Image (spheres, rainbow, N blue to C red):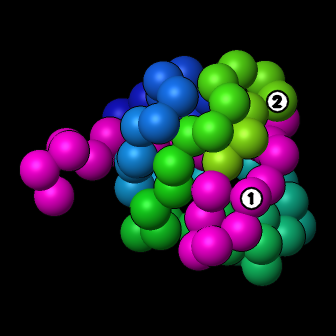
Amino acid sequence: MMPLDMLPIGQTAEISDVLGDQNDVKRLAEMGLRCGVVVQVVQQGSPCIIRVDGSTLCFRECQHLQVFVEPVSAAV
């Protein structure tokens, strides 16, 4: 498991955990960032740009809100 903003460009990963204030976690879920969803990194770092469910999102992690992912192998 690793922070979302650490994934290399082009890498896909499945969201394994979203940590933070309940309202922030709920808002991210409404935007598609929730456990089990597969994302792809377009731009690495903070802010990172990701693709999720056909949409492109700009996401900046902070110490109060973090998204953790498990990389998905290229063969899947």
Residue 29: x and y in percent read 70, 73
- Which amino acid type corresponds to the residue marked 2 in the rendered image? Pro
| Badge nearest the viewer, 1 or 2 | 1
From the image, which quarter does the N terminus lie in? top left
Residue 63 percent across, percent down from the top left: 79, 27
Nearer the N terminus, badge 1 or badge 2? 2
Task: Name the residue carrying label 2.
Answer: 47
Residue at position x 57%, y 40% in the image: 41
Q: Residue at x 83, y 46 (%)?
A: 58
SS label for mark 2:
loop
Can the viewer see residue 20?
A: yes
Q: Name the residue under label 1.
A: 56
Quarter of the rendering occupied by the C terminus: bottom left
Of residues 55 and 32, the one drawn nearer to the viewer in this rendering: 55
Q: Is mark 1 on a helix, strand or loop?
A: strand
Task: Say which of 24 and 9 sits in front.
Answer: 9
Task: Decide: is 45 above or below 4.
Answer: above
Q: Inspect this view and state whether residue 25 appears.
A: no
Residue 57 lies in what quarter of the image? bottom right
Task: Tell me the amino acid under the disc marked 1.
Answer: Thr
Which residues lie in the magenta part? 51-76
Residue 59 shown in magenta:
yes
Residue 29 drawn above or below residue 15: below
Residue at (75, 49) in percent of width and height:
20
